[in-house]
Image (cartoon, rainbow, N blue to C red):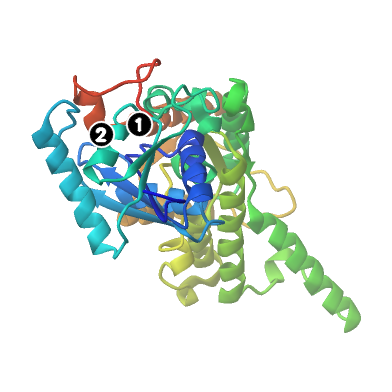
Amino acid sequence: MTGSPRHGLVIGKFYPPHRGHQYLISHAAMACGQVTVLVMAARRETIALRDRMAWLREAVADKPWVAVSGVACDAPVDYGDPSVWAAQVAVMRAALARDGRPPVDAVFSSESYGAELARWFSAAHVTVDAGREAMPVSASQVRRDLAGHWDWLVPAARTGLTTRVVVLGAESTGTTTVAGLLAEHYRARGGAWARTPCVEEYGREYTVTKWAAACAAARAAGSPEPALDQVTWTREDFDVVGREQTRRENAAAARAGPLVVCDTDAFATAIWERRYLGAAARALQPWARDELPGHDLYLLTSHEGVPWHDDGLREGDLDVRAQMTGWFTTALTQAGHSWVLLTGSLEDRARLAIRATGLALADRASFGASVTDASGAMARGADGGSRAD
């Protein structure tokens, strides 16, 4: 091949995508007029192919000449077996043909097998950071210690791998207190955990604004200012609150460590619509269903044993609280959400919240073994991990 390569290829599992992958792709993008990043995912791996592709696409969004593609591949990995090479490369070629990609001129990799892969494509091999001096990280390292390598992930992968826990419940059942204690507990761990946010309830802020506007309108009309329970709520109000709650949660997740604690969410907002609109309330809207982020766990604060406290923005009573607890349990169960009921003293509730959250975090940080992990013949870097995965 003479001159600059026209089409560069980067292959890997990107399980999960990290800054080392981004560095490799950036080098290919600087050298080629077109680049294909091919994500190869196996069934045993627990991050969906579509998620890896989406995270990488966000990472290279400023490079329109870089195309991220993906393909399922359950062939074993054995760099010393020509038949395995043939099986792997056949899947790669089929994916490139499916996507109408041009012939490959150069293969970019940080691995020792890169030269052999390039030979199968009759292409040049370009080695990038083989010693991992610029980017000392591998996907296998990330999988072994997700929190410890959190800041090595590409931003979209951090957002996607964040565990989201929602504390919800009726008025005056301690949701805000429990959410704050939970977030504080994990912030105390330090490191990436220090960025554990507690996303506040937007509905309270909206209520203050709406009530103030109603009072101002009444004053302008020469009428008495309405009490809080005289303020009229509409479906549109809940549309605004639900979508803004999700926007704030997603913004917090983009800056967070491995955990985001939410003091309510858009799903809970839909239950509050039922509380205020009664028979006029709608079924779950897209913002409480289709547009809702994937939450790992809901913590429902029981009304039982919690004294009523009116902070000036509450309108319920013991009967209403009991009814709402029932609504939450029914709605969460029908929607298929995982939820844990918090009862007892505040200490009991906080302790159970921490335990349940710990299990959710452990599940999120447990990755199914990669095909490369299972192959004794794979070429490994000095740290025992392959950046290609």
Please indicate, yes or no, whether residue 125 appears anywhere in the rendered image: yes
Q: In this view, does 128 lie to the left or right of 198?
A: left
Q: Kindly identify the amino acid type of the residue bearing the numbered disc 1.
A: Asp
Q: Which residue is drawn at 45% across and 49% down?
A: 55
Marking on residue 116: 2
Q: Using a 10 Å C-alpha cutoff, classify the residue at mark 1 as few (fewer than 14 neighbours), some (14 to 19) or many (20 or more).
A: few
* Residue in the image at 50% along x and 22% along y: 148
Residue 2 position in % (x across, y down): 41, 49
Measuring from the top left, give residue 388's x and y in whole percent.
Answer: 35, 34
Q: How many labels sit on residues?
A: 2
Quarter the C terminus occupies:
top left
Helix, strand, or loop for circle 2?
A: helix
Q: What element carries label 1?
A: helix
Q: Earlier in the sequence, mark 1 or mark 2?
A: 2
What x and y, as percent, mark residue 162?
48, 39
The foreground one among 265 and 96 is 96
Label 1 – label 2 distance at C-alpha: 37 Å
Q: Which callout, 1 or 2, points to the residue nearer the camera?
A: 2
User: With respect to residue 311, does 143 lie above or below?
Assistant: above
- For the residue pair 3 and 119, the one nearer the viewer reads as 3
Q: What residue type is labelled 2?
A: Glu
Looking at the image, which residue is at 35% across and 22% down? 385
168 relative to 377 in the view: left or right:
right
Q: Name the residue under label 1.
A: 363
Measuring 41% from the left and 42% from the top, which residue is drawn there? 296
Q: Which residue lies furthest to the left in this view?
A: 83
Q: What x and y, as percent, mark residue 189?
A: 58, 20
338, above or below 226, in the image: above
Circle 2 residues within 10 Å: few <14, some 14–19, many ≥20: some
Instruction: Pick the residue in front: 11 or 70.
Output: 11
